[in-house]
Image: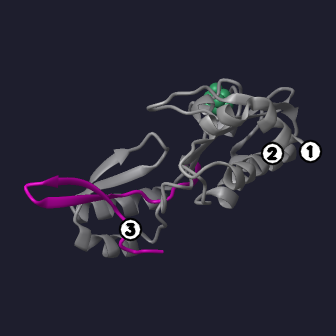
Amino acid sequence: MDKHYGNLQKIRNGRRTFSITPHIPGGFTTPETLEKIAAVARKYNGAIKITSGQRIMITNLKQEDLMTIWQELGMEPAIKSPYSVKNVEMCPAGFCKRSKYNTIGIGMKISRKFHGAEMPNRTKIGVSGCRGACGSVYAKDVGVIADVTGFIVTAGGSAGYFPRLADIIAKDITEQEAFELVERILNFYKSTAEFGEKLGPFIDRIGLDNFKNAVLGAS
Ligand code: SF4
């Protein structure tokens, strides 16, 4: 890992400030981690921002401090390349009264296996414990949703410049089938899409039926 990892945020009067975003899988953290983040923010005059990606960004940092800050945090950067699985966002699932299944388990499994994996473009994954789909799962490139009849897997969602609602690729499948389908979707996207192509536009270019045939064919 590059211990200097940081994003240039601002250049003001020749002064460059950087941000860092430590990896916090699924947005679940501990008092000890929060204390470490608070300590470096206080020590290095950082500003703390809760991000939409269920992470904590520390910004307003000096480049020369970044290496020491990473050492003091003892954490990994959340994003090492924009062309990768940037994050796996999870709803509270088992902690929520509306959940149909505790999807934190499959969410963490997906995060452990695919977080940081190289992709043609930035890729976000959302996991939620009921069809309420908190965390905007239908706006994520890949989504996993638990329902009373089984799991739903979606693909191609996006917010931002070119918003696109995700397509449902499969429903009423098991947790294991959902995990394997996520893997096939990511593998097919990685091996077939053009560099820089987001998953949604890739699905639109080749056609939803062709995409489904490719990722469901082996099931
Ligand atoms: S998606 Fe459902 S289970 Fe998850 S937080 Fe929202 S309401 Fe609760």
Q: Which residues are magenta?
A: 1-26
Q: Give the structural element (helix, strand or loop) at label 1.
A: loop
Give x and y (percent) for residue 166: 65, 29
Q: What's the image's color scheme?
A: one colour
| CA gap, disc 1 and disc 2 | 8 Å
| Label 2 residue SS | helix
Left or right position of 73 against 124: left
Residue flagged by tag 2: what amino acid is it? Leu
Q: Distance between the Cα atoms at labels 3 and 2?
A: 33 Å
Residue 5's tag is 3
For ligand 1, which image quadrant applies? top right
Q: Are marks 1 and 2 in contact (CB under 8 Å)?
A: yes
Residue shown at 43% from the left, 74% from the top: 2
Of discs 3 and 1, which sits in the foreground?
A: 1
Report, in whole angstroms, how far the alpha carbon at label 3 lies from the one at label 1: 40 Å
Q: Is residue 128 visible?
A: no
User: Which secondary structure lies at badge 3?
Assistant: loop
Q: Nearer the viewer, residue 97 or 6?
A: 6
Question: Is residue 12 one of those drawn in magenta?
Answer: yes
Tell me if mark 3 has few (under 14), some (14-19) or many (20+) residues whose alpha carbon lies within 10 angstroms of its own: some
Instruction: Provide the residue designation for mark 2.
Output: 181
